[in-house]
Amino acid sequence: MTMRLASFTVDVDRDVNLPRQGRREASSKCHEGDRDEVRFASSTRGLRLLVEMLEETGIKATFFFEGDTLLHVARLLDVRELLSKHEVACHGVCHEDITGEATGVAMTDLEISQMLDQGRDMLRNIFARDPVGFRAPYQHIDQRTLSLLPKKGFLYDSSITKEVNEEDGSLHPWKVAGDLLEIPVARARDREGRRIVSYLWPMHEGKRLPSDYEHLTAGVHSGVLVFATHSWHIVETYNRGLLSDASVQINLDNLRRVLERARDEGMEFLPLEDIARAWKG
């Protein structure tokens, strides 16, 4: 299949989420003067700003919602209306570390099943539509979870990172469990030979330039390039904390530049659900 597609995806989860040893749910990083508690304000504000930016560019995106964050955001925003033009997908309930890689507490088969059911139902209750996509928190996923997803009605997963083929620039989805399609995040090499991934958070943290991602885009000649970020990362970072309005605008401008350059180079942006259905068809 010769397609050159792109998708912009957003993980809508708790602010500056961090795993805690021995705990199922993630916490939020404390900055000076903060209380040690889970926060959602940056994720909520960043979500609104991202949707406004996408409205201006005409790009339809996929938003992976963590259930707890969705409940908090829905108290402040009319998310059903806000995201009526975009896909909503599942990102767990409380940013669980499915494999236990970061927390030391791996989930049991039953806990994974319950988490998928609860996350799906939370989205269904608020958006009145069935989510068909999943991304594991921290991108920590295993074969148990992949095998469960199609049984729960999911069409695709987007948790795995895969290398862009250096010979022909291809990056294609593939079936990972039954009829479940994996639409991966991209990994490649930058101009200096260093690894770069199509998660955009290093750009928000000041560790990467938009031109680095433009170079990544130029190297993908067929298949699907999945861009990813967090809604909170638009207005808050790990290292600097809450950003000034000027820094928030720079974040949005850099993001717009990366996405528009990809579109100008001939990539067609679609939500992941549309890509999954087209690929299967």
Image (spheres, helix red, strand yellow):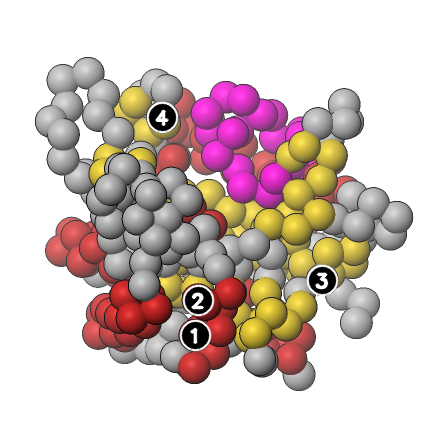
- Residue 134 vs residue 102, the one in the foreground: 102
Are the residues at dot 2 and dot 1 in contact (C-beta closer than 8 Å)?
A: yes
Q: Mark 1 or mark 4, which is nearer the start of the sequence?
A: 1
Q: In the drawing, does residue 279 fall left or right of residue 42?
A: right
The answer to whether the residues at label 4 and label 2 have Cβ atoms under 8 Å apart is no
Secondary structure of residue under mark 2: helix
Which residue has dot 1 on it? 148
> In the image shown, does 108 or 26 lie closer to the viewer?
108
| Count of picture labels | 4
Which tag is nearer the camera, tag 4 or tag 1?
1
Mark closer to the observer (1, 3): 1
The residue depicted at 60 percent of the width and 50 percent of the height is 161
Whether pointer 1 and pointer 3 mark residues with C-beta atoms closer than 8 Å, the reply is no
Residue 10 visible in the displayed image: no
Task: Work out whether residue 221 or residue 248 is closer to the camera in this orientation and state it.
Answer: 221
Q: Residue furthest right?
A: 167
Q: Specify the amino acid type for callout 3.
A: His
* x, y percent for residue 19: 31, 39
Q: Circle 4: is it few (<14), some (14-19), or many (20+) Cα within 10 Å?
A: some
In the rendered structure, which disc, 1 or 3, sits on the residue that comes first in sequence?
A: 1
User: What is the crowding at mark 3: few (fewer than 14 residues within 10 Å), some, or many (at least 20)?
Assistant: many
Q: Which residue is mark 3?
A: 172
User: Where residue 238 is drawn, which disc sits there?
Assistant: 4
Q: Quadrant of the N terminus?
A: bottom right
Where does residue 203 sit, x and y in percent of width and height? 53, 29
Mark 4 or 2, closer to the camera: 2
Residue type for callout 1: Leu
Q: CA distance from mark 3 to mark 2?
A: 21 Å
Residue wearing tag 2:
145
Distance Cα–Cα, label 3 vs label 4: 32 Å
Stretch in magenta: 197-214
Q: Going from the N terminus, do you reach mark 4 or mark 2 first?
A: 2
